[in-house]
Amino acid sequence: MSVEQIYCEVKVKIITTRFGEIEIDEKKIITFPLGIPGFGELKRYVLIDYKDPIQWLHAVDDPDVAFIVINPFVIFPSYSVDIRDDEEMFLGIKGPTDVVVLAILCVANNSMTANLRAPLVINSANYNAAQILIGDERYDFNTPLPALPLKS
Amino acid sequence: MLVLTRKTGQIITIGDDIRIKVVDVGNGIVKLGIEAPREMPIFREELYEKLKELNKESAKMDLDKLKHFLGEQ
């Protein structure tokens, strides 16, 4: 195998209702082996940068399905996520540096909330991910969001 | 629905991979221990239903709604 082949990027086109047709690096596709609750059949997603710290987690195989996500630690510095051993093994997580945590945002009635009870956990080493339900009841499914420190 | 009677410490097996043990019973509360394959998600049903509904609501977000919200800050 030549060097060119090893480093060749495979681009995949995905159709989105919000952003039109976009091209993504195949290696950046995040796999949710179990899907996301409510969307069990959709396993492949991609992160699209929006206004930092906001990103969209977009389904590769459904142009309509996308979630607004943020790094919750930016907004809630005291937030912590306990990932169970079986969840770590399922995602192949070997250490804390593998872990990326994102919270899904929801906008209703002009207020924005973050789902801190069920964060998305991504293994950045193998791009496997899952939405986990954490046991800590201090964190709510609809945690009101303070003003975002947006960088455009 | 299959209804089985079990005592504390007794187990129900489902297929080859799933075992549910009655760990404790009392005051209208049953504590269950569950052994299942890692790829088998296990949730308290009411939380799972809530999560599904919230995810469906969250996935409806359109760009205009987000821009509207961000513009109002």
Image: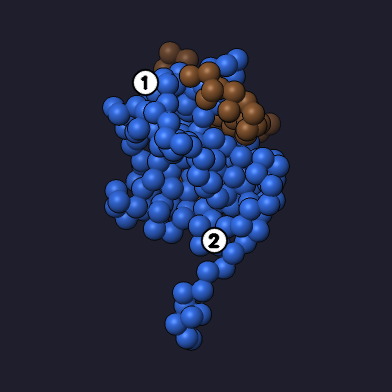
Chain colours: A blue, B brown
Q: Is residue B34 left or right of residue A78?
A: right
* Amino acid type for the residue under numbered disc 1: Arg
Res A86 visible: no
Q: Nearer the viewer, residue A147 or A32?
A: A147
Q: Residue furthest bottom?
A: A1
Circle 1 crowding by C-alpha within 10 Å: few under 14, some 14–19, many from 20: few
Mark 2 or mark 1, earlier in chain: 2
Check the image and report above or below for A147 versus A64: above
Q: Nearer the viewer, residue A26 or A18?
A: A18
Q: Is residue B55 left or right of residue A72?
A: right
* Amino acid type for the residue under numbered disc 2: Asp
Q: Is residue A41 left or right of residue A102?
A: right
Q: Which residue is mark 1?
A: A138
Res A144 visible: yes
Q: On the image, which quarter does residue B2 sit in?
A: top right
Position in image of residue A132 (x %, y %): 46, 38
- Give the label, 2 or 1, closer to the camera: 2
Position in image of residue B23 (x %, y %): 39, 31
Q: What residue is drawn where x is 43% and y is 43%?
A: A121
Q: What residue is drawn where x is 62% and y is 26%?
A: B65
Position in image of residue A62 (x %, y %): 69, 47
Q: Which mark is residue A25?
A: 2
Check the image and report above or below for B21 versus A108: below
- Of all chains, the one bearing label 1 is A
Q: Nearer the viewer, residue A109 or A35?
A: A109
Q: CA distance from mark 2 to mark 1?
A: 38 Å
Q: On the image, which quarter does residue A139 sit in?
A: top left
Position in image of residue B49 (x %, y %): 60, 27
Q: Residue furthest front?
A: A152
Question: Secondary structure under badge 1?
Answer: loop
Question: Secondary structure under badge 2?
Answer: strand
- Of all chains, the one bearing label 2 is A
